[in-house]
Amino acid sequence: MNNNPIEFWFDFTSPYSYLMAEKIDDLAAKHGRKVKWHPVLLGAVFKTTGAVPLTQVPLKGEYAVRDFARSARYLDVPYRQPSKFPLATLAVSRAYYWLHDRDCTMARNFARAAFRAYFAEDRDISDPTVVVQLAAAQGANAEELAAALGTQELKDRLKRECDAALARGMFGAPYVIIDDEPFWGADRLPQIEKWLETGGF
Amino acid sequence: MNNNPIEFWFDFTSPYSYLMAEKIDDLAAKHGRKVKWHPVLLGAVFKTTGAVPLTQVPLKGEYAVRDFARSARYLDVPYRQPSKFPLATLAVSRAYYWLHDRDCTMARNFARAAFRAYFAEDRDISDPTVVVQLAAAQGANAEELAAALGTQELKDRLKRECDAALARGMFGAPYVIIDDEPFWGADRLPQIEKWLETGGF
């Protein structure tokens, strides 16, 4: 057993990432682990793998919408299919890293609030104004964040995270890595739990 | 609660179908249900959905091979990545339906044996000779089956099953339907169990 942090790679527009986000910290804490959150743009990842958004695949798309809600009920997480789906997560992801470099607890709370805003309250988190409001509600300086969102520095920061995700083998979200073992999907929570309990199986 | 049979749609070359095949009958029996098995050709389904075999997708393919074995360990099912993968399942699927129309118990035992032969013993179940041997080991008439494999009647029978799978919304394997609720993937076993326990959630 060890206490290396768990890596959690995700996209804010991914329903299964939201479900993982609601569960992974508590599960990790039960086993004395911390979790490092890494929002990325799944679109950048899909360019490499040739994948398309789930809901655009014939038959699979209809199933997916049903499965999002059912999986949320199964995990006892509030869920409402967003009216705008999927959406662009550039602003919300950049905001996350801007906050993270200032106050990592605030960034975590912002990420949770952004997921809930999108998947439980149907707010449009692709809108930079909404993103800044959500960050301000966590105590961030709204004007500074709004000004930072368009800077090259923050664009580059997010780009580096997307490149790192690909380098770590990410092809879909959520993508969780524990001691170099990758787990894809919220449906891998039982395997993650067993892995943490047993130190690998 | 009711006791409608569960539908289990699968392809013999799908590792997650094998895992489901090892679990679904016992799980169903615990809740007073029977399972109807339907082997189909996932290639025919993928023509409609535009999907490609999992192991051919960059990054995802490498993950998948790792996940097949880990998921088998998690479910305590013997597994060895076949040296020929994926393979053509025409002959084994046709043989299943030929057997099923004569003796449904023999067909079920044959299907289990074929899955084990492929995923635990690395036998080439795309080879009609191997298929006939596996059927004969269950008590089938080898000569009659060998002669039947190329008949139009049996080809049409399998074709109808593939069409039916698409009509039921199948886009991947395994695909399990309980009271019109579809579940895709061996990783939906916990949700299937809860569904059977609660009559829907």
Image (tube, coloured by chain):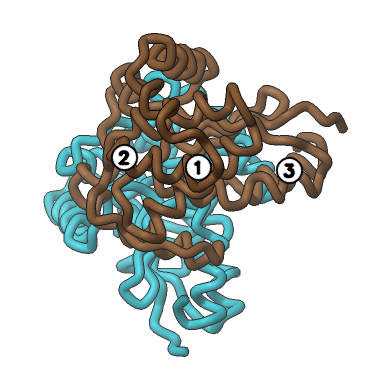
Chain colours: A brown, B cyan
Give the spatial CA distance, label 3 vs label 2: 33 Å
Give the spatial CA distance, label 2 vs label 1: 30 Å
Mark 3, residue position: A28
Q: Secondary structure at mark 3?
A: helix
Q: Which mark is residue A185?
A: 1
Looking at numbered disc 3 in the image, what kind of residue is underneath it?
Answer: Ala
- Residue at position x 12%, y 50% in the image: B152
Looking at numbered disc 1 in the image, what kind of residue is underneath it?
Answer: Gly
Give the spatial CA distance, label 3 vs label 1: 16 Å
In this image, A111 relative to B169: left or right?
right
Q: Residue B171 or A168: which is nearer the viewer?
A: A168
What chain does badge 2 belong to? A
Marked residue nearer the N-terminal end (2 or 1): 2
Q: Position of residue A47 (x, y in %)?
A: 29, 19
Q: Are marks 2 and 1 in contact (CB under 8 Å)?
A: no
Mark 2, residue position: A129
Looking at numbered disc 2 in the image, what kind of residue is underneath it?
Answer: Thr
In this image, B173 relative to B150: left or right?
right
